[in-house]
Image (spheres, helix red, strand yellow):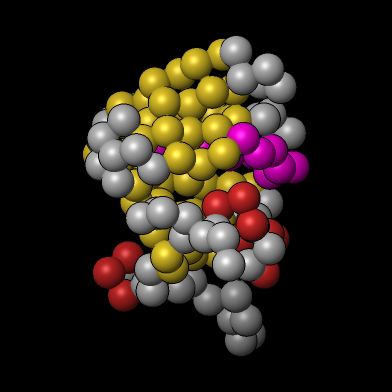
Amino acid sequence: MIETKAPKHYRWDDMPAETLKGTLTRRMITGDKMMIAEVRFKQGDYVPQHSHHNEQITFITAGALQFKLGEAQDQEEIVRAGEVLVIPAHCPHSALALEDTIDIDIFCPPREDWLSGTDSYIRNEE
């Protein structure tokens, strides 16, 4: 039997970094049912409030992000290196980099808006 869904091996350093709003950069790897992304922030970079139908797990490997959560943005979580935040589907959230930060995000299912480039909330104004 021929394997049609063979495992794939990637190196982050070989993945192209996409420049986003401010100095944010993002690299992505997508499977059929999930996506992983490395997002790099410089201190002060800000991701405005948004929500999506995807469940999100955020793992901070360096630095710290301040998240505001909920419709009123009245819940605050500071997530530092070595810590993880699970954001349920449809939960409004925003993020501010308190220092230079490397953030690993896992989404299920993959973010269609990220793949198609329709994620205007995180892109530079044209």
**Quadrant position of the C terminus in the picture:** bottom right
Q: Please identify the quarter of the rendering in which residue 63 is found.
A: top left
Q: Is residue 124 left or right of residue 4?
A: left
Q: Is residue 108 visible?
A: yes
Residue lying at 68% horizontally and 51% vertically, measured from the top left: 109
Specify whether residue 57 is painted magenta.
Answer: yes
- Where does the image place residue 88, in percent across and percent down from the top left? 65, 30
Q: Is residue 89 left or right of residue 86?
A: right
Q: Main secondary structure of the magenta part?
A: strand
Closer to the camera in the image, 90 or 123 = 123
- Where does the image place residue 13, in percent across and percent down from the top left? 27, 69
- Where does the image place residue 8, in percent across and percent down from the top left? 45, 73
* Location of residue 13 with respect to 98 vertically, above or below: below
Task: Count the marks.
Answer: 0
In this view, which residue lies farthest toward the bottom? Answer: 2
* Location of residue 47 with respect to 35 vertically, above or below: above
> Which portion, as a residue range, is magenta?
49-59
**Quadrant position of the N terminus in the picture:** bottom right
In this view, which residue lies farthest toward the front? Answer: 126
- Where does the image place residue 89, in percent across and percent down from the top left? 70, 35
Specify whether residue 52 is painted magenta.
Answer: yes
Closer to the camera in the image, 2 or 118 = 118
* Location of residue 117 with respect to 24 vertically, above or below: below
Q: Is residue 113 left or right of residue 26?
A: right
Residue lying at 42% horizontally and 65% vertically, measured from the top left: 19
Q: Is residue 38 visible?
A: no
Q: Please identify the quarter of the rendering in which residue 87 is found.
A: top right
Closer to the camera in the image, 98 or 16 = 98
Residue lying at 60% horizontally and 13% vertically, measured from the top left: 74
Residue lying at 46% horizontally and 18% vertically, measured from the top left: 77
